[in-house]
Image (cartoon, helix red, strand yellow):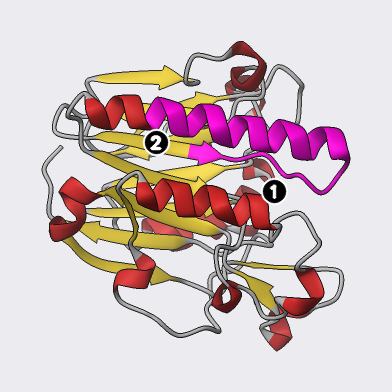
């Protein structure tokens, strides 16, 4: 099964650029999108009814902000918007698809750069979400987690680690949360296949950083350890344009 995850930085804008068609040509079974910035009422029919896919959307209370979406060939047993904490769920950041054999989490994690309050919100989101995941794993479920974590984990996950060590997105407490995710039994699938740096998923558009590959790897596919043996490939697609992020992919031997 092939899955694609992409922070699209506005689904309507991506559609106008033709970006979604590029990943649909890969014929993925599931497409997870973050930062859609739209409610279903805002979207054209071409984005609500894609031939061969079931579409699901989770939007923020605030119009034009945050939001996640999922397109799936196989209809899940159940779809849940949010993970049960109202102050996080109102921002439309989490979409959970229950396929029986596994749970798929499509998550747009908060950005902590705007203020100390937003950094505190991000860290609280991290803490509560990990507690939720641990409960799910303890209940015996297999989990695939994807999305924009808004944090680079290690020095090799961004082009200029020293210059950014005091910036949200690479703070010690943010990176420690990813360490805690790993300790809880989750595997960074891209690092199963690639141990070198220079592979990024986000670039600052204002400084034309993408042309120079001065980027950050902040988008991930994690799987619970119980699924790590099923992972066949994990990819980054830096040549696919349409957002300040690029898509990432996972191929895994599992049935919906």
Residue 14 among those drawn in magenta: no
**Horizontal and vertical percent position of residue 233:** 25, 68
Q: Give residue 159's quadrant in the image.
A: bottom right
| Residue 105: mark | 2
Picture quadrant of residue 165: bottom right
Left/right placement of residue 89 relative to residue 136 reads: right
Q: Nearer the viewer, residue 248 or 116?
A: 116
Instruction: Kindly identify the residue that appears in the image at 58 percent across and 60 percent down.
Output: 218
Judged left or right of residue 118, residue 46 is left
Q: Earlier in the sequence, mark 2 or mark 1?
A: 1
Would residue 187 be seen by someone viewing this image from the given angle?
yes
Is residue 241 placed above or below 36 in the rendered structure? Answer: below
* Secondary structure mostly seen in the magenta stretch: helix
The image shows residue 248 at horizontal and vertical percentages of: 44, 62
Q: Residue at x 57, y 67 (%)?
A: 217
Label 1: how many residues lie within 10 Å, few (<14), some (14-19) or many (20+)? some
Task: Give x and y (percent) for residue 175.
Answer: 59, 56
- Which residue is pictured at 53% across the width and 57% down the height? 219
Given contact means CB atoms under 8 Å apart, are the residues at marks 2 and 1 in contact? no
Please provide percent x and percent y for residue 154: 55, 69
The C terminus is located in which quarter? top left
**Discs 2/1, front:** 2
Q: Which residues are magenta?
A: 107-133
Q: CA distance from mark 2 to mark 1?
A: 24 Å
Is 5 placed above or below 152 here? Answer: above
Assign a secondary structure to mark 2: strand
Any part of residue 98 in sight: no
Depth order, front residue of 30/132? 132
Give the residue drawn at x 39%, y 81%: 195
User: Circle 1 sits on which residue?
Assistant: 13
Q: Is residue 155 above or below residue 86?
A: below
């Amino acid at each position: 099964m092939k899955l694609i995850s992409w922070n699209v930085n506005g689904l309507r804008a991506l559609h106008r650029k033709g970006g979604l068609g590029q990943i649909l040509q890969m014929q993925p079974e599931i497409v997870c999108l973050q930062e859609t910035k739209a409610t279903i009422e805002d979207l054209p029919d071409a984005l609500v009814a894609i031939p061969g896919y079931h579409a699901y959307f989770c939007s923020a209370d605030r119009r034009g902000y945050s939001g996640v979406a999922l397109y799936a060939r196989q209809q899940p047993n159940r779809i849940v918007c949010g993970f049960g904490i109202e102050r996080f769920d109102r921002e439309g950041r989490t979409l959970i698809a229950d396929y029986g054999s596994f749970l798929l989490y499509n998550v747009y994690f908060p950005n902590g750069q705007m203020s100390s309050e937003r950094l505190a919100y991000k860290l609280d989101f991290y803490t509560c979400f990990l507690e939720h995941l641990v409960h799910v794993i303890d209940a015996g479920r297999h989990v695939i987690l994807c999305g924009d974590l808004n944090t680079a984990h290690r020095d090799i996950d961004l082009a200029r680690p020293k210059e950014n060590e005091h910036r949200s997105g690479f703070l010690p407490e943010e990176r420690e949360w990813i360490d805690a995710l790993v300790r809880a039994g989750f595997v960074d699938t891209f690092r199963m296949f690639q141990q070198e740096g220079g592979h990024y998923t986000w670039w600052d558009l204002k400084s034309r950083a993408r042309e120079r590959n001065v980027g950050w790897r902040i988008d991930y596919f994690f799987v619970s350890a119980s699924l790590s043996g099923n992972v066949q490939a994990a990819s980054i697609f830096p040549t696919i344009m349409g957002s300040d992020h690029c898509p990432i992919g996972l191929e895994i031997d599992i049935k919906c």
